[in-house]
Amino acid sequence: MSFANSFIWGACHLLLLALSHSHTISVSETTTAGHARPTHSIRANSSSIASLSRHKLCQVQILRYYSRKGGKTTSLKNHLKSIHQNEYEEFLKSESDLKLKNTASQSSTASSSTPLQEARKQLTLKDSLMKNQKWCTSNPKSKEIDKLIAEMIALQDLPFNFVEGIGFKRLMQFIAPNYQLRGRQFFTNYICDDLYPKLAEKISQLLKTFDKISFTTDIWSEPSANVSLLSLTAHGINEDFNRIKVILKCLTFDGRHTGDLIQDKFNEMLTEWGIIYEKIHCFIRDGGSNMVRAMRLADIPDITCNVHQLQICVRHMLDYDEDVKSLIGKCKKICTHFNHSQIAQSELHKIQSEQLNQQPLCLLQECNTRWSSTFYMIERMIHIQDSLCLYASKHNIPQISPQEWQQLKKLITLLQPFEEITRNEWQQY
């Protein structure tokens, strides 16, 4: 017998011997270098496979299969199915019994869960159901959100219908899905009937801590709403010597703005807040004759507003010089051209962004009642001078000469200190 045949016979003998004692077969291959290299271990899934491995008729096939690297039990199953039908049926029955046994074991484990585990499951289900349930309006969290939304409307000067916007609804659905969103009428009543009285009471207590109170007031017309308004703001110093200001009232003013009617409105506002005459330090007002008469009739100490005096002074200076007045008139016409034409404004923006690589800016229109608006109008024109010159070269608008540009720059330098004073004073009022 050759060496190869002897080796095969010995390997078969060892294989059958191992199968007769264990369900695990380990076979090693010998490399060309003579070292043993372990291959996969094959574990029989049932006694039927082990009995098959002992069949003498299958020794060659089993040995040939397990002598390859990567052999698995799938080939043994296929071998049973194709060659040994009876053994294959026994194997299927054993495998089915094993699956039933495992299923029963899992069911037993699940049924033996502790009361704590069952409580956790019930709690999780309850939480899941409550997650999509809306809070009732008396819920403490719901009331707190109502209060915060109302304060936001008041502090940010938002319209009451803000709460009915789709954007706000989507936001609240995301951050507080259990909250029942209220409508504009609810928040109107909440702010006017609940929030305002509470805040007014706190302000009344604050005013009582002031030894003296100064007031600023103004009356103006609001064209967008076709209404006139009269405001009253209180200024005082608290115990820590900090300056505090509070807007007490801003009411609509019907009829002519006569001194007699203004004086009646002042008396109503002071009475509403319980402010006695002895606590009034002074009223700061504009220089209008109607305001002056109202203070005289009420016998209230008063002084003219510095900002208003400065307004009159600067406006008189701008109107006094005809050259300056004419140049400002030309600037106003240029601004009107762009503010009345969306096409012209778009082309100006295109010149700034594409040709000059600048941030697109609009021109600012002057307001006759505020001299500072004249300053801001000229300042913006100087800032976008290059784009205005490029636009004027292609369109029929008033053109500003190089000498006039220099004159405008000098005018801005002259008005700069007055603008700073006006801005700082207005911030205090």
Image (cartoon, rainbow, N blue to C red):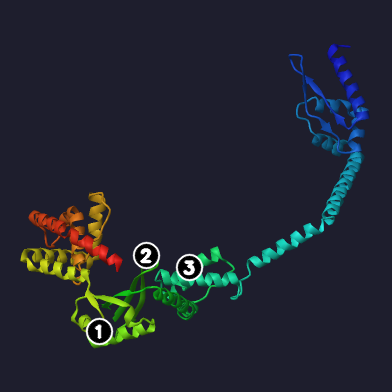
Determine which residue is flagged by label 1: 299
Please give left or right for residue 365 compared with residue 150 in the image. Answer: left
Residue 35 in sight in this render: yes
Amino acid type at mark 2: Asn
Q: Residue at x 54, y 66 (%)?
A: 173
Q: Residues within 10 Å of mark 2 (few under 14, many from 20)?
A: few
Q: Position of residue 147 (x, y in %)?
A: 51, 72
- Are the residues tagged 2 and 1 within 8 Å (C-beta)? no
The circle on residue 242 is: 2
Measure how far apart labels 3 and 2 are at the Cα level: 38 Å
Please give left or right for residue 68 compared with residue 410 in the image. Answer: right
The circle on residue 168 is: 3
Q: Residues within 10 Å of mark 3 (few under 14, many from 20)?
A: few
Amino acid type at mark 1: Asp
Q: Residues within 10 Å of mark 1 (few under 14, many from 20)?
A: few
Which mark sits nearer the N-terminus, 2 or 1?
2
Q: For this rendering, which residue is in front, 83 or 198?
A: 198
Image quadrant assignment for residue 277: bottom left
